[in-house]
């Protein structure tokens, strides 16, 4: 159970980054895409702080 949270968080970060890149590449909603990429970076940063 202890290793479940970081695994789900990493999957969520990849999904956020991929979705953000998709939004930017398709020129749909650039602001939301950038915010999704920033959210993914913050999530990975939190994981590095918690588990490093």
Image (cartoon, grey):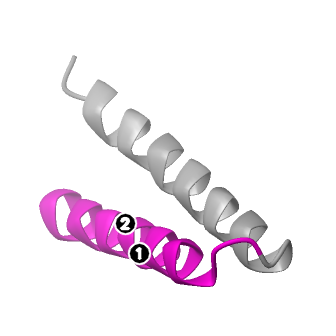
Quadrant that contains the N terminus:
top left
Quadrant that contains the C terminus:
bottom left
C-alpha separation, residue under disc 1 versus residue under disc 2: 5 Å
Q: Residue at x 17, y 70 (%)?
A: 49
Q: Residue at x 43, y 66 (%)?
A: 40
Q: Residue at x 37, y 66 (%)?
A: 44
- Magenta stretch, main secondary structure, is helix
Residue 8 is situated, as x and y percent measured from the top left of the image, at 40, 34
Inspect the magenta stretch and tell me whether residue 13 lies in it.
no
Q: How many marks?
A: 2
In the structure shown, which secondary structural element does the residue marked by tag 1 occupy?
helix
Q: Is residue 1 left or right of residue 23?
A: left
Image height check: is 28 above or below 15? below
In the structure shown, which secondary structural element does the residue marked by tag 2 occupy?
helix
Q: Is residue 19 left or right of residue 1?
A: right
- The residue that disc 1 covers is 41
| Magenta-drawn segment | 28-52
- Pick whichever, 4 or 12, lies toward us: 12
Residue 43 is situated, as x and y percent measured from the top left of the image, at 31, 63
Inspect the magenta stretch and tell me whether residue 49 lies in it.
yes
Determine contact: label 1, label 2, CB under 8 Å.
yes
Q: Residue at x 80, y 79 (%)?
A: 27
Image height check: is 3 above or below 29? above
Q: Is residue 41 left or right of residue 48?
A: right
- Which of the 4 image quadrants contains residue 17? bottom right
């Amino acid at each position: 159970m202890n290793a479940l949270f970081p695994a789900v968080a990493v999957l969520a970060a990849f999904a956020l980054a991929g979705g953000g890149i998709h939004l930017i590449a398709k020129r749909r909603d650039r602001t939301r895409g950038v915010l999704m990429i920033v959210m993914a970076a913050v999530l990975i940063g939190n994981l590095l702080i918690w588990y490093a």
